[in-house]
Image (cartoon, rainbow, N blue to C red):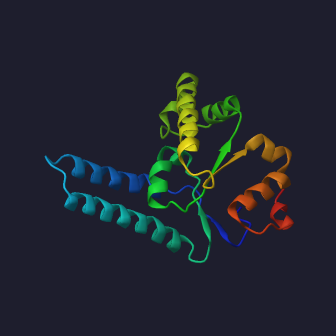
Amino acid sequence: MASSSEVHGAGELTLLPRLNSKFQGLQKKAFTGSSWGSEDTWQLERSIADLSEELISTMRRISPTSRYVTDKLPTNFLLLGLKHILAPQAKVIHVTRNPIDTCFSNFKKQYEGKLYFTNSLEKLGEYYVGYADLMEYWKSVLPHDRLYEVNYEALIAKPEEEAKNLFQFLELAWDPSYLDFL
């Protein structure tokens, strides 16, 4: 995707988890009071608008001219609801892969304690089931024009066809030179 001049590949950002921490702080503040009034609602809405502006302005700072900035942080699937609240126009690309291949790949990659569940095949399996269930939920509640699923095996088997479909979803012009890295 980053072959297109309209897409900036930003790698694995930690922006959504940071914004989630702020959002959780807002929730604690909002729901610990004894009563809830219209002023509280307005403050929460204003705070959410501020977080939305922080997300969008950060993406603009990363790449002022790109139409899309990609964030490949693997745990972003946990925060798709927040992402949709803060940037409902944003699109999500969900890459699926054979579950056994996914788990084995994560098991053999030593993440040095960052992803504790990858050190055990049992924990990996449990995590994967939770991930798959959550993604099914997101697919059922998020607008269908905002979430696109790409199958890794299909992408490897037919890269041009799959890439063209992805570019169509993103409403980006296709250029065969995007596959020159193959």
Tell me residue 36's x, y (percent). 19, 51
Q: Image quarter for residue 99?
A: top right
In the image, residue 83 above or below residue 113: below
Question: Looking at the image, which is closer to me, 120 or 171?
Answer: 171
Residue at (80%, 58%) from the top-left corner? 164
What is the residue that sits farthest to the front in this orientation? 38
Question: Looking at the image, which is closer to me, 156 or 149?
Answer: 149
Q: Image quarter for residue 180?
A: bottom right
Tell me residue 80's x, y (percent). 50, 49
Q: Is residue 37 left or right of residue 124?
A: left
Q: Is residue 125 visible?
A: yes
Residue at (86%, 65%) from the top-left corner? 176
In the image, residue 86 above or below residue 64: above
State which quarter of the image contains the C terminus.
bottom right
Q: Is residue 14 visible?
A: no
Tell me residue 66's x, y (percent). 62, 73
Residue at (26%, 63%) from the top-left corner? 42
